[in-house]
Image (cartoon, rainbow, N blue to C red):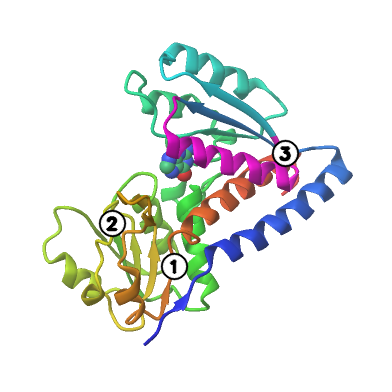
């Protein structure tokens, strides 16, 4: 079977086009312009690029960007002072603190300092707890995008056997919760899982977020499965690849998302969506 492509790039663009229209309408109706504070600490080239893409997407959608680039020597106290400032700024409806943060800063303390109702990434423990209950103010962007990608295939999630490879707080755990909320039967696999290949082969939906280039090979995938590749790995030759060996897996899967052009663009679209929804909530519009 030759897999069909889950075109995250095209899906993300159509969502961004719709958000741009909705932002213009909200502004015309209520005078409110959604705003995102983007905070980047340090000079990590990948993080720099991610934040640049996020800000460009905001500009294109008519979302105001409050941009903060801080040096890698920034102290925790300095970052917390900035977060206090953007927490109090009525022009800001969403706050993005790009991860990872430099070693001298405790990410947990920083993420907890973001006001839960401005937590556009959904990383604050309040929103994590609400996510467990199925009623988060903000759903983390990458998992939210993954679900939309699976839904875009037209394949049902309910009743399916889903395997999530990876158990990070940002991707694996929230994705497993979202799949569970949609009545999938979910297994979470990680580096200590026994018979990992066999578990993967059981999956009708396979979400791979393990951070190892080409980790999932053709023989690990069930015929007809929906495969979402969250990996972003830069090879020595500069090529960007996912965690899934695209060629062999696409011969067995029913659907597969590419890297690049899969999950990455959807993460950005979901950040815009979360910021827009937050702006509407702040205006008392459901
Ligand atoms: N680093 C890697 N992914 C993400 C993300 O979705 N949000 C933030 N803030 N940092 C990240």
Magenta-highlighted residues: 42-64
Question: Is ligand 1 less than 8 Å from the beta carbon at label 2?
Answer: no
Determine whether the residue tagged by mark 2 lies in a helix, strand or loop.
loop
Q: Crowding at label 1, few (<14), some or many (≥20) Cα neighbours within 10 Å? A: many
Determine whether the residue tagged by mark 3 lies in a helix, strand or loop.
loop
Q: Crowding at label 2, few (<14), some or many (≥20) Cα neighbours within 10 Å? A: some
Q: Can you tell which quarter of the image residue 56 is in?
A: top right
Q: CA distance from mark 2 to mark 3?
A: 37 Å
Q: Where is residue 164 shown, x and y percent of the image?
A: 31, 61
Is residue 75 among the parts visible in the rendering? yes
Tell me the tag on residue 129: none
- At 35% from the left edge and 23% from the top edge, which residue is drawn? 106
Tell me the tag on residue 213: 2
Is residue 202 among the parts visible in the rendering? no
Q: Where is residue 112 shown, x and y percent of the image?
A: 44, 27
Taking the image in four quarters, ligand 1 sits in the one at top left
Q: Where is residue 171 shown, x and y percent of the image?
A: 38, 50
- At 75% from the left edge and 41% from the top edge, which residue is drawn? 284
Sequence order check, earlier mark of 3 and 1: 3
Q: Which residue is mark 3?
A: 34
Q: Which residue is mark 1?
A: 257
């Amino acid at each position: 079977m030759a897999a069909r492509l889950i075109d995250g790039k095209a899906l993300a663009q159509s969502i961004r086009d719709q958000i741009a229209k909705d932002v213009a309408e909200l502004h015309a109706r209520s005078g409110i312009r959604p705003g995102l504070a983007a905070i980047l600490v340090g000079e990590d080239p990948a993080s720099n690029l991610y934040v640049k893409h996020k800000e460009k997407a905001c500009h294109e959608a008519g979302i105001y960007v409050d941009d903060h680039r801080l040096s890698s020597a920034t102290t925790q106290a300095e970052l917390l002072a900035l977060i206090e400032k953007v927490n109090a700024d009525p022009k800001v409806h969403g706050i993005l603190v790009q991860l990872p943060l430099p070693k001298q800063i405790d990410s947990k303390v920083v993420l907890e300092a973001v006001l839960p109702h401005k937590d556009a990434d959904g990383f604050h423990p309040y929103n994590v707890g609400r996510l467990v209950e199925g009623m988060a103010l903000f759903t983390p962007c990458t998992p939210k995008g993954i679900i939309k990608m699976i839904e875009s295939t037209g394949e049902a999630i309910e009743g399916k056997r889903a395997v999530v490879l990876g158990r990070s707080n940002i991707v694996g755990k929230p994705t497993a919760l979202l799949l569970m909320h949609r009545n999938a039967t979910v297994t979470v696999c990680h580096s200590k899982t026994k018979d990992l290949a066999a578990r993967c082969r059981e999956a009708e939906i396979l979400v791979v977020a393990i951070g190892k280039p080409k980790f999932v090979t053709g023989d690990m995938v069930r015929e007809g499965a929906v495969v979402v590749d969250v990996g972003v790995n830069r090879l020595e030759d500069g090529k960007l690849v996912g965690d899934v060996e695209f060629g062999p897996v696409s011969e067995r899967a029913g659907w597969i998302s590419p890297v690049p052009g899969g999950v990455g663009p959807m993460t950005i679209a979901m950040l815009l969506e979360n910021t827009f929804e937050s702006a509407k909530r702040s205006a008392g519009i459901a």
